Amino acid sequence: MRTVIIALLSCTVAACAQDSQVSSTLPTGAAAYSVISAPNKGQDGVADYRIGALDTLDVTVFQEPELSAKALQVDASGQIALPLVGSVEAKGKTVSDLAAEIEKRFGEKYLKDPQVTVSVATSVSQRVSIQGEVTEPGVYQVSGPTTLLEVLSMAKGETDVAKLNEVVIFRNLNGERMGAVFDVASIRRGQADDPSVQGNDMIVVGYSAARRFWQNVVRAAPIIGVFTRIAPIPTSY
């Protein structure tokens, strides 16, 4: 019996060691939000929304109705066309980024201190993929501002062996593949912000070998008679 218990404890240590699946180079905690930000407070994530191809935009140039445009569609290449300044890259920008770029274009030759506002009139569905320990991994359509918890809900939640403090969001930023690690358990407890998810993001939910091990112990206990009472599966893994 003693040998069996020692073997089980050894397996527990080994299982915990196997849980280190996320590269130590990926930012965690507060540093993760410098890569993948949370929605701005009170704005429901709209300020962080990245414009996509085929979205329609309203562009308003203050006191210049001839230069303003309603329901202006972003073309398949990510461009919009405006009077005087021609084509402007819109895809991948936030509305504030695009407004600043348009102000710059008009201010270079045509207007003094132009004031431009941009809003998303309609957003076309974009795809987000989610892999790992979720009930229904796959590719999901999102429209407009979306958060990590919302995408997890689309995938019907995590499995019972998910490692909730190792949920990674991967994103292409300025042509470079970036990633950040988030603690979903802390987010659900209100101890951390729910990060924004954008079109083409990939989410990977980690696997807890330790939780799987304890599940197997609970199932096997009546057979091997090791314990008279099995403790609950640890929630910290």
Image (cartoon, rainbow, N blue to C red):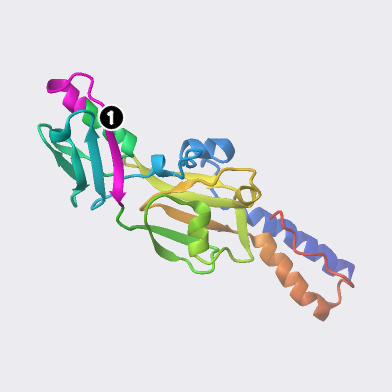
Give residue 24's position: percent from left, percent from top: 55, 43
Give residue 44's position: percent from left, percent from top: 46, 45
Q: Nearer the viewer, residue 63 or 2?
A: 63
Amino acid on which the number 1 mark rests in the picture: Ala
In magenta, the rendered stretch is 104-122
Q: Is residue 111 magenta?
A: yes
Q: Residue at x 71, y 69 (%)?
A: 215
For the question of whether residue 90 can be seen, the reply is no
Q: Is residue 57 above or below residue 112?
A: below
Q: Residue at x 44, y 44 (%)?
A: 45
Q: Nearer the viewer, residue 9 or 68?
A: 68
Give residue 30's position: percent from left, percent from top: 57, 36
Q: Residue at x 61, y 55 (%)?
A: 164
Q: Name the quarter where the N terminus is drawn.
A: bottom right
State the SS at label 1.
Answer: helix
Q: Is residue 236 above or below residue 83?
A: below
* Left or right of residue 63: residue 120: right
Task: Name the residue tied to disc 1.
Answer: 100
Outermost residue toward the top in this view: 112
Q: Nearer the viewer, residue 41 or 10?
A: 41
